[in-house]
Image (tube, grey):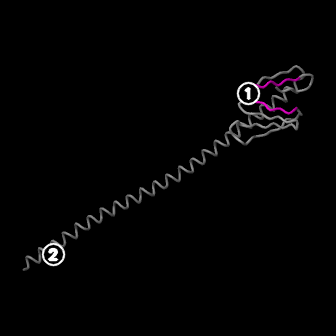
């Protein structure tokens, strides 16, 4: 009888050990999946911040390029005016320029709805320009075409 009881006790202990091993394996799998989920969540958040920062940088780059174009044409007009009659400058732009007789230049992109502006210290006519542009001083008057 002792031997049968001992066999039953050993059998119960062996089953408990097998159950504990399976329980530990499943616990490790759950912890691994949880850790993997946290890592993926962090990577997604970082990529969202990266994409937003990239968009912001592209927007600022576009504004700087438009401002440079505006100042370039402002300098061309001023140079033509100050150099006297007969001065002529040929330039090309990829943007749409709007020059107003209020001494203001606006630079618009063809695909964007915002613009960048700058001023020129002389008054000119109203112009809408794009592509090849010719700036001339004819008898002290700046003509843009």
Q: Secondary structure at mark 1?
A: strand
The quadrant of the image that shows the C terminus is: top right
Which span is picked out in magenta? 125-137
Query: In the rendered view, would you say 116 is above or below 27?
Result: above
Find the residue positioned furthest to the bottom. Answer: 1
Badge 1: few (under 14), some or many (20 or more) residues near its Cα, within 10 Å? few
Residue shown at the point (77%, 35%) measured from the top left: 70
Q: Give the x, y percent position of residue 129.
A: 78, 30
The percent coordinates of residue 113 (x first, y second) are 71, 42
Q: Quadrant of the N terminus?
A: bottom left
Q: Is residue 45 left or right of residue 137?
A: left
- Please tell me in which quadrant of the rendered image residue 99 appears: top right
- SS for dot 2: helix
- Please give the name of the residue rendered at 64% of the width and 41% of the height, measured from the top-left corner: 58
Relative to residue 42, is residue 19 depicted above or below?
Answer: below
Quarter of the figure with residue 120: top right
Residue 9 is tagged as 2
**What is the C-alpha distance between the residues marked 2 and 1?**
94 Å
The answer to which quarter of the image holds residue 17 is bottom left
Question: Which residue is nearer to you in this view: 64 or 98?
Answer: 98
Q: Residue furthest top?
A: 86
Residue at screen point 73% across, 27% down: 131
Q: Is residue 134 magenta?
A: yes
Q: Which mark is residue 131?
A: 1
In primary-sequence order, the first of circles 2 and 1 is 2
Question: In the image, what residue occupies the spot 86% across and 26% down?
Answer: 143
Q: Main secondary structure of the magenta part?
A: strand
């Amino acid at each position: 009888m002792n031997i049968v009881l001992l066999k039953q006790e050993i059998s119960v202990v062996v089953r408990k050990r097998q159950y504990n091993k399976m329980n530990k394996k499943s616990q490790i799998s759950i912890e691994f999946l949880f850790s993997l989920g946290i890592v993926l969540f962090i990577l997604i958040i970082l990529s969202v911040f990266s994409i937003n920062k990239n968009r912001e940088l592209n927007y600022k780059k576009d504004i700087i390029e438009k401002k440079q174009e505006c100042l370039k044409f402002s300098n061309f007009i001023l140079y033509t005016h100050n150099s006297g009659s007969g001065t002529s400058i040929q330039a090309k732009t990829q943007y749409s320029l709007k020059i107003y007789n209020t001494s203001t230049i606006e630079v618009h992109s063809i695909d964007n709805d915002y613009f960048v502006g700058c001023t020129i210290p002389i008054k000119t006519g109203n112009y809408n320009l794009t592509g090849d542009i010719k700036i001339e001083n004819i008898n002290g008057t700046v003509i843009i075409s």
